[in-house]
Amino acid sequence: MARTASELADDLTQNLIASVEGLGEQIRTSAVSETRELLAQGLEDQFLQPGNRAQFGGNTPDELIMLFLGETELSKIPRLHNALVRFEEDGGVSEDFRAALLFAVQLIRDETYEF
């Protein structure tokens, strides 16, 4: 039995909807992956990597960490304020703090970790 033009049009519409939905999900997944990687790379470059400091005003990663801890909303968080005081007294950012930053960067980068 031959199909009517309306039936064919309905099938075509359903196929297009399914294709667009699939494409939309692919775009969303790619955007999430790309955003996670760019965020992780940006944090790593700014706070953990010594190279290419011109884009950060010539400040070292440790100097930037201390600046952020002292001059932003982060300074209002007691635990971070206490860390800054400790870093100032000890003459720099602790290796444990850098390790915690690296841990956070890797969690952002890891697509199996949902946050």
Image (cartoon, rainbow, N blue to C red):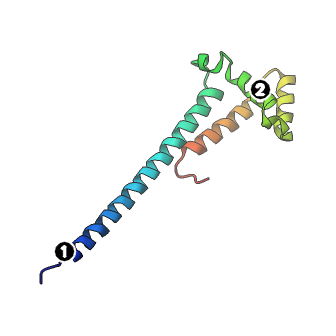
Q: Which residue is mark 1?
A: 5
Please tell me which residue is depicted at 60% across the width and 45% down the height of the picture: 107
Horizontal and vertical percent position of residue 66: 77, 26
Secondary element type, mark 1: helix
Res. 27 in view: yes
Res. 48 in view: no
Horizontal and vertical percent position of residue 103: 64, 40
Q: Amino acid at mark 1?
A: Ala
Q: Disc 1 or disc 2, which is closer to the eye? A: 1
Horizontal and vertical percent position of residue 93: 76, 26
Q: Residue furthest front?
A: 6
| Mark 1 neighbour density, 10 Å: few (under 14) some (14–19) many (20 or more) | few
Q: Which residue is mark 2?
A: 66
* Res 49 → quadrant: top right
Please tell me which residue is depicted at 81% across the width and 29% down the height of the picture: 70
Indicate which disc, 1 or 2, sits on the residue closer to the N terminus: 1
> In this picture, is 104 found above or below 64?
below
Q: Which image quadrant: the N terminus? A: bottom left
Towards the viewer: 81 or 87: 81
Please tell me which residue is depicted at 62% across the width and 53% down the height of the picture: 115
> In this picture, is 66 found above or below 111?
above
> In this picture, is 39 found above or below 6?
above
Relative side of 38 to 98, left or right: left
Q: Residue furthest left?
A: 1
Q: Number of numbered discs present?
A: 2
* Res 58 → quadrant: top right
Relative side of 37 to 71, left or right: left
| Mark 2 neighbour density, 10 Å: few (under 14) some (14–19) many (20 or more) | many
Q: Amino acid at mark 2?
A: Met
